[in-house]
Amino acid sequence: MNPREFLDILHTAEKLKDTLRHCTTSNRRPESVAEHSWRTALMAMLLRGEFPDADTDKIIRMCLIHDLGECFTGDIPTFAKTDAERAAEDTLLEQWVASLPQDTAAEFSALFAEMQAQQTQEAKIFRALDKLEALIQHNESPLDTWSENEYTLNKTYAFDAAAFSEWLTALRQEILQDTLDKTTESSAKALSEKEPRPKPENA
């Protein structure tokens, strides 16, 4: 890969810094796709000791590239993305990958194929982390930024993706507990604010 080819890849990937996701940060700033990919990769690195037989470097590479298709289509929440939109994203991504230097194109193609097939431990770990990171971010975002369906999704989503691993299933349970704590606390606060305040005795 020559320096110009290297820069061209980075210029394309830079679009993910400005591609916003549905979720916000804890300070209400819209989250970028690049930020989601970064923290998913960090999760993989931190879990190296929990999956000693897995190729952590490969999982991190999966995490870093998995949303590159959104450079061309933008981000559409999983619950809203249609099959046609997925197909369009896949086509544009494949065309871009095919234009890359041969070694890079081969590596990216192999990683995307492995992620899609979901047959290896690495692909399964990646898929679980991708989904769980989104749930963690929702728990960190203010509750009034949630869409109505996310109150249910944050309680039910991604249990299937984590089911192959006892540790990841335990993590999903902890995330669920955070969701329950967050929504229960918010409901209690809202109820308290609606209750009439007692009048002063001398009123």
Image: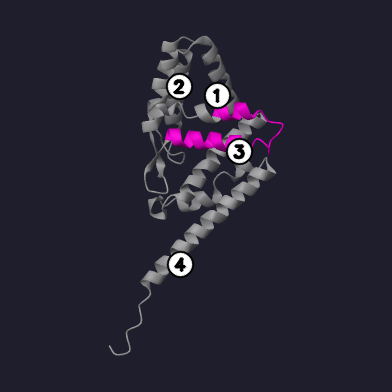
Mark 1, residues whose alpha carbon is within 10 Å: few (<14), some, or many (≥20)?
some
Asked if the magenta segment contains residue 38, the reply would be yes
- Is disc 2 in contact with disc 1, using a CB cutoff of under 8 Å? yes
In the rendered image, the vertical position of residue 69 relative to residue 165, given as above or below: above
Q: Are marks 3 and 1 in contact (CB under 8 Å)?
A: no
Q: Could you tell me residue 49's position as x and y percent?
A: 68, 37
Q: Residue furthest right?
A: 53
- Residue, disc 2: 93
Q: Is residue 169 above or below residue 35?
A: below
Give the mark, 2 or 3, whose residue is nearer the N terminus. 3
Q: Residue at x 46, y 50 (%)?
A: 140
Element type at mark 4: helix
Range shown magenta: 33-62
Furthest-front residue in this view = 3
Q: Nearer the viewer, residue 79 or 169?
A: 169
Q: Which residue is mark 4?
A: 188
Q: Which dot marks residue 112? A: 1
- Mark pair 2, 1: CA separation: 10 Å
- Report the mark closest to the observer, 2 or 4: 4
The crowding category of the residue bearing disc 3, from other C-alpha atoms within 10 Å (few below 14, some 14 to 19, many at least 20), is few
Locate residue 119, reporting x and y percent: 65, 29
Residue displayed at 51% across by 50% down: 154
Whether residue 117 is visible: no
Report the Cα–Cα distance between label 2 and label 4. Answer: 46 Å
Q: Which percent across, then down, holds residue 165? A: 68, 41
- Whole-angstrom CA distance, mark 4 to mark 1, is 45 Å
Q: Earlier in the sequence, mark 4 or mark 1?
A: 1
Q: Earlier in the sequence, mark 3 or mark 1?
A: 3
Question: In this view of the protein, which residue sits in the foreground, 186 or 83?
Answer: 186
Which residue is identified by label 3?
46
